[in-house]
Each structure stands twice: as C-alpha cells, then as structure tokens.
Amino acid sequence: MVDHKRYDFSVNDVSEVYAGPGGKLWELLMGEQIHVGGPEQTDLLARKAEIDKAGQNFALLDICSALGGPARHLAEKYGIKVVGLDITPEMVLEAKKRTEGKPYASKIEYRIGSGLDIPAHLNSFEVVWGQDAWCYIRDKVRLIEETWRVLKPGGTLAFTDWIWGSVSVSEEESDILMEFMVFPNLQTLNGYAELIKATGYELVEKVDLQEDFANHMDIYLNILQKAKPDIEAGFGVELYAAAEKGVIAWQQAAHNKKVGRGLWIAKKP
Ligand SMILES: C[S@@+](CC[C@H](N)C(=O)[O-])C[C@H]1O[C@@H](n2cnc3c(N)ncnc32)[C@H](O)[C@@H]1O
C-alpha cells in the first residue's frame, strides 16, 4: 500500500471545511449529493447493494451523510428507512432543513456523531453505506469494525471512496493533494479489500472507478472555472485561486492514475 506521511488533520479541521465555504463550494461542483457522479452513482451503489429489491422496513445507515442528498434520494426512490450520520452539526442541521416537509421525511433520521463511534446498537441495519467520505476518517480499521458491529448478520456493506491509484506519487504531490482535501490518509482499492476481509466480511465486489473519476475531475474543473466570477465575489479571490490549484492537482493526478476512486460491496455472514 502507498503509505505516505501522515497528515495531521483532525475531525475538527474537516468539520470546519464543511461548516464553512468549503462545503458550499463542493455543493456547487457536485450538487447536493456531494460525491463523484451524483444520483447516478447512488443508483449504481443501490443496485449493487440490492436496495432496489428491498422492503419498506429495510434500514440503511449512511456514514458521513453531509447534506442528506443521498438519504433523500434513497428514501424517495426505494422507500427504505435511512439514518444519516455526520460529525458536522451544521451539515446535519441543513440536511434536516432540506428534508422537512418532504412526503418521505418520516423515513429519514439524522444523527450527529462519528463513524468511529457509531451511535447505534449492535445489529441495527441491513445496509451500512458511504459515498466518497471515508477518506476523511483517519482510523479506517476502526471504521470498518464499527460498520460490522451495527450491521445485521446477512447485511451488506456498500461504499465508494477516493483512493490512491496504481502509480505512486512523490511526497510533494501527496502534500498538495492531501492538504487541499484535508484528508488524513487514503486507502487503495486492494487495501480496503484486505481490511474488509480482515474484519470478517465476505468481499462480494471491488470496482476500480479510476477512469470515471478522472473524467469527473475535468467536469468539476470546468464548472469551477465557469463559476470563477461568482466564487470570487462570494468567497474571495484567494479561495478561488486555492480551489482551482487544488482541483487542477487532483485532475492531473487522476489522469496520471495516481489517485482514483473505488467501490466495495461486502456481506456480513
Ligand atoms: C464529502 S462529504 C460526504 C458526502 C455524502 N456522502 C454525499 O454523498 O452527499 C464529507 C462529510 O463527512 C463528514 N465527516 C467527516 N469525518 C466524519 C466522521 N468521523 N464521522 C462522521 N462524519 C464525518 C463531514 O462532516 C462531511 O459532511
């Protein structure tokens, strides 16, 4: 595994990003489902986790639920119950606000808390879910162990995440990429697979989404550059310049296969 220097970001640093302009900027680029590929990717993960065949009492935990975009999509489209868990109170408040009054609102509950200490009982959920966010969580061993604790036997772990690619990066490149995103560390496609299996899961599938990730980085850079006047007016010239530099670094690293994105499906026996 590519194990670069450890980055000293804490949960508070990540929360500060999402409570401030950073969260708004990511929504501008990606939409209210703040992950690569938006609703289409949510449906892809849902099919792979067989949520499309689920019953009404089926319960899913979304770890790092942010603005609740995926929670609303899943509750509305598949009729399942969703618990959204996020560490940033501002995100949870906003998720609640955006869910209030929706016809499926009673199916969704939001909790403030950490994926490293999930506020839920043993064997609570049919699916534990995450999209492009576990890269913010330093202790991935504990995170996967926590998913195991709260999943029912026979339940499914389904997630996507940003990862290191097949080509290694220099320390300098790694610094630029990680410091821009405030990631404490990243896994690899096989690293996550090994971690999942070591926890006791049966790995069903791992999918390398590297090419799609690189294509999306082009799209995000384009959206960012088009929105330059608005971003500079709303958040300042410096923030725009930092965002553009960071997105270009990720775009180039993605096209050079240095970073990517993966999808994993596993079963708790
Ligand atoms: C990229 S956003 C997640 C996007 C969301 N999965 C979606 O698809 O819309 C990252 C989120 O992770 C949350 N987060 C970071 N560390 C966390 C932790 N340890 N436990 C729970 N949430 C965390 C942040 O507050 C932020 O809202």
Image (cartoon, rainbow, N blue to C red):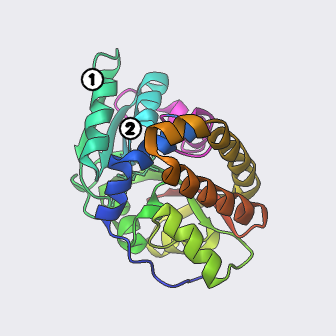
> Label 2, on which residue?
67
Look at the picture and state if 133 lies above or below 100.
below
Depth check: 97 or 41 in front?
Answer: 97
What residue span does the magenta drawing correspond to?
32-59
Q: Residue at x 43, y 62 (%)?
A: 136
Say left or right for 195 vs 190. Answer: left
Q: Secondary structure at mark 2?
A: loop
> Label 1, on which residue?
106
Looking at numbered disc 1 in the image, what kind of residue is underneath it? Ser
Depth check: 169 or 40 in front?
Answer: 169
Q: How far across and how far down the image is residue 2, in percent?
A: 61, 81
Look at the picture and state if 153 lies above or below 195.
above
Q: Residue at x 30, y 55 (%)?
A: 150
Looking at numbered disc 2 in the image, what kind of residue is underneath it? Leu
Q: How far across and how far down the image is residue 140, in percent?
A: 42, 70
Task: Check mark 1 vs ligand 1: CB closer than 8 Å? yes or no.
Answer: no
